[in-house]
Image: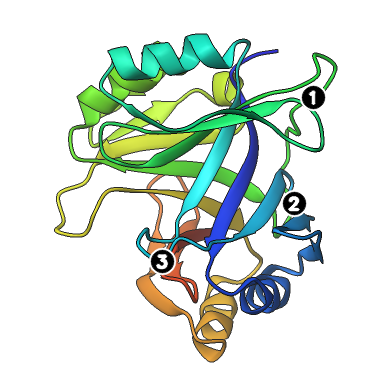
Amino acid sequence: MGTTIKMFVIAARDGSLAKKFYENLFNWKITDVGPLLQITGAGLSGHILKWPHKDHPTHVSMYINVENIQECLGKVEEMGGTVILQEMAVPTGGSIAQFLDPDGIIIGVYHSNPHTETQSKAEIDVNQIGFFEIAAREGHRSQRFYEAIFNWRITDDGPIMSISEEDAGIAGHLFNWTHEEPPYLTLYIKVEDISASLEKVTQMGGKVIIPETEIPSGGTFAQFLDLDGNAIGIYSGR
């Protein structure tokens, strides 16, 4: 079992509103199973978490498979991260923990039955997660952090550092974030028509923060804030 992305979580103040938003936008099937809403159809196992902590912002997080959670958390602290949730068992089997990376981004780790597989495929279907992005204050510091914690190969290609799809399970990139807004983690979902998707986002109460923009390697992308202010990316044409 490698250190690949196992699942994702979107924290929301009102689970029922978030459920309607994402079902309408991406045609995901979302089932209420108590404190969590289970997402299917995203290409990667996912949940909406009914976020009860008023003093802490909502967020998007991802969970990475690791062989030993305690060893991983020890390495996190050695590298300047902060453990915020110690290892705990989960009802579906296995255990999870959470930490803050050096930029305060919430990351989860997951240890499951050895036979559990990470969902991955060569071709990403519409409305499925295609890649992820980490915006960091100091890109090379974060490069060293994630290489040490998860053994990901991260290549410095200039303004953007590419995270190995083979290592992480889905393609990703890391870059220096120079804006006043805090650093972030976001996921990108493939869509048929970015303009139509952004129009739907606005109609349902979200906010477009990056309009449709060309990707140098082909295709276009955009970003929006959902009803809880979580940044989500969409892309098309690649």
Which of the image's four quarters has the N terminus?
A: top right
Q: Name the amino acid, label 1.
A: Glu
Q: Earlier in the sequence, mark 2 or mark 1?
A: 1
Q: Specify whether residue 130 is in view.
A: yes
Pointers 3 and 1 in contact (C-beta within 8 Å): no
Q: Nearer the viewer, mark 3 or mark 1?
A: 3
Disc 3: which residue: 54
Disc 1: which residue: 117
Q: Secondary structure at mark 3?
A: loop
The percent position of residue 161, horizontal first and vertical second, equals 33, 30
Q: Residue furthest bottom?
A: 203
* Viewer-side residue, 237 vs 47: 47
Q: Earlier in the sequence, mark 3 or mark 1?
A: 3
The percent position of residue 234, horizontal first and vertical second, equals 53, 61
* Side of 24 where 32 appears, left or right: right
Q: Is 104 located above or below residue 76 in the figure?
A: below
Q: CA distance from mark 3 to mark 2?
A: 36 Å
Q: Secondary structure at mark 2?
A: loop
Residue visible at 45% across and 60% down in the picture: 53
Residue visible at 46% across and 71% down in the picture: 228
Which numbered circle lies on residue 191?
none
* Mark 3 residue crowding within 10 angstroms, few (<14) / some (14–19) / many (20+): few
Which numbered circle lies on residue 125?
2
* Mark 2 residue crowding within 10 angstroms, few (<14) / some (14–19) / many (20+): some
Q: Nearer the viewer, mark 3 or mark 2?
A: 3
Q: CA distance from mark 2 to mark 1?
A: 19 Å
Q: Name the amino acid, label 3.
A: Lys
